[in-house]
Amino acid sequence: MSRLDGCFDALKSDNRCALIPYITAGDPEPSVSVDLMHALVSAGADIIELGIPFSDPMADGPIIQAACERALRHHTSLSDVLDMVAEFRTTNNTTPVVLMGYLNPIERMGYEEFADRAMKADVDGVLTVDMPPEESDELVELLGSKKIDPVFLLSPTSTDSRIQKIATAGSGFLYYVSFTGVTGASHLEVDEVAMRLDRIREQSSLPLGVGFGIKDAESAAEVARVADAVIVGSALIHFLEENQDNISAAKHNISILIKSIRKSIDIIRLEG
Amino acid sequence: MSLEKNDYTLYPDNSGHFGTFGGVFVAETLMQPLEELRLVYEKLITDKDFLAELDYDLKHYVGRPSPIYHAQRLSDRAGGAQIMLKREDLNHTGAHKINNTVGQALLAKHMGKTRIIAETGAGQHGVASATVAARLGLECVVYMGAVDLVRQALNVYRMKLLGAKVIPVESGSRTLKDALNEAMRDWVTNVDDTFYIIGSVAGPHPYPALVRNFQSVIGREAREQCLEMQGKLPDALVACVGGGSNAIGLFYPFLNDESVKIYGIEAAGKGLDTRSHAAPLCAGIPGVLHGSRTYLMEDNDGQIVEAYSVSAGLDYPGVGPEHAWLKDTGRVNYDAITDDEALAAFHELTRVEGILPALESSHALAYAIKLARQMDKDQTILVNLSGRGDKDIHTVASGEGMHE
């Protein structure tokens, strides 16, 4: 069983919702990232989404764009990101790590080398934002051969036939984008999300994560009622942006937010 | 047209690919809107009423057909083949860009969209988009890199006069590629009521095919005009390539004419051996950006690098995927012209023919002059004069001020 499957199975049997924080690798500088990953786990993260910085993050709002720019100022490469996962694994062998990014750095490294190195670094999943299932055959097959889960996005514009296609191509979990827009915006409407998730569940038994627009304990709790995982990114990165010269302050604030989200999503499930 | 062994006009395939290039590399939210656009486009482009409407606009609003002009003195001075100019500079708004925006605006109208967005580098596509939006009474938002906004102040004011809102883009390198990112972000947010008019043959399927088909009016006319004027096809075609829409517009109707040699000319900027150029086909490698797989300028980590050219309209680190495929199949020869060569051609045409070419088109002219020298006097080269140079006077003047 993959680490992601194991993680979601365990959470399900405890009636808990997974908490997945996103950070951009190398933001604000590469030496911080592994430490930050451990801090996220200590604060209550179940799975870590580690962003591969890219010069042209088309699906991201200003906060994650700026995070990519900070990371790229230090030339954080895909190779560096894989090294970070390997380093993280030297002291954490249980928390799944999903790489999230855009296709071009992977194209540049080459699919085979990437899949091979991701396996060696012990990466659990790969989400490539600008690679829909239609364009993914080769990479998905290579990742599969290395027991790495390809994670795909679903959105409010996904039709039933697309949901089917994506549910077939993906494994690990499905990432539902809660509104039409970019990361960090705030248009979250939980009733609408709940309806969409029901429709997706008719076609897939994969765990459903929800991301985009989850900012705090309150919005996370609302989503945790209906989703198998809540994904939080821009709200965390905001602290890194504000405290670029004071990493320990940023880490402290991030930990506080993660702990409060952890608490709220656990309570909401207990209340049923 | 006879079906050759390789019929170049049959691409892209059903999934939007030109060989290994092209495709649809976007986030999930845009997949369905792109599919809807494809379906509407494919239906309308064979619809008699739609085509009649388009033809009417091209004739009475754009001013088509644009003439072909035999640049006799330029040819004599080059001392070889006869150089003919396809005068896209005479179109309304002064460049080929309007052929595409008129077509896409009609699509927007038929799809019931009330809001137009566009990206622009030099401002020509922004002006062409603002123009058609004004005419149809649609709201128009143009994204423009903050660096370009300063460089092209006149076009910014022109767009504002036309009622468009121009939004400066402060992310990344703050140029055309970042404006495209920002336009995509707007589209993904406002996809219900918004039509995104992409200005070049770049982007995800169906855009490269759709823009090519609207622009190929250039080549269709030129082919007929050459046959009528000279009783034969030209021996060579030359056009500049940034994203590549004027080039593909000219080339496409000639792709199966084996006797016609075709040259696409990129911007070599300060030289292909420097970092300051905009020549992904000549000096880049394949990758994925802005929705399609194509040749790109990038570093060893797959990060896109900034392009440079004296000509703002060629200043883009990618290129339309069809050009990538035409390069790899060998049907089109791609080469590059430096800033200095283009500026020399700008002056040459202005002085000997009284035609002020855009700096973009000056790249094609510079190459044509070199090519003509290697050809016979009874041969002809057709150059796409894609735009007029009024917008570039300031750039040329300030460049020369620095030299003196």
Image (cartoon, rainbow, N blue to C red):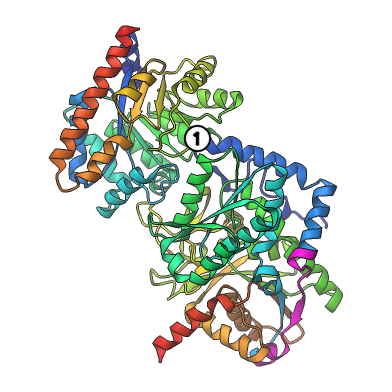
**Image label count:** 1
In this view, the residue in front, B319 or B88, is B88
Task: Give the residue displayed 81% in from the left and 52% down from the top.
Answer: B51
- Mark 1, Cα crowd under 10 Å, few <14 / some 14-19 / many 20+, is many
Does residue B99 sit above or below B287 in this rendering? below
Amino acid beneath label 1: Thr
**Quadrant assignment for the N terminus of chain A:** top left
The residue closer to the viewer here, B267 or A144, is: B267
Instruction: Please give the range of residues in magenta.
Output: B60-77
Q: In the image, is residue B61 part of the stretch drawn in magenta?
A: yes
Vertical comparison of A71 with B85: above or below? above
Callout 1 secondary element = loop
Residue B167 in percent (x, y) is at 47, 56
Query: In the rendered structure, does residue B7 fall within the stretch colored magenta?
Result: no
Residue A92: name its quadrant: top left
Q: Is residue A178 above or below residue B75?
A: above
Indicate the position of residue B288 as horizontal and vertical percent values: 48, 49
Considering the image in quadrants, where does the C terminus of chain A appear?
Answer: top left
Percent x, y of residue B101:
66, 57
Q: Position of residue A69 (x, y in %)?
A: 31, 51
In which quadrant of the rendered view does residue A159 lie? top right
Does residue B6 appear anywhere in the picture? no
Subunit of label 1: A
Judge whether residue A42 can be spotted in this image. Answer: yes
Nearer-the-camera pick, A230 or A169: A230
Q: Which residue: 69% across, 41% down? A: B112
Residue beneath the point at 21% across and 24% down: A259
Q: Which residue is mark 1?
A: A180
Q: Is residue B99 left or right of residue B31?
A: right
Residue B389 located left or right of residue B268? right
Q: Is residue B91 left or right of residue B356?
A: right
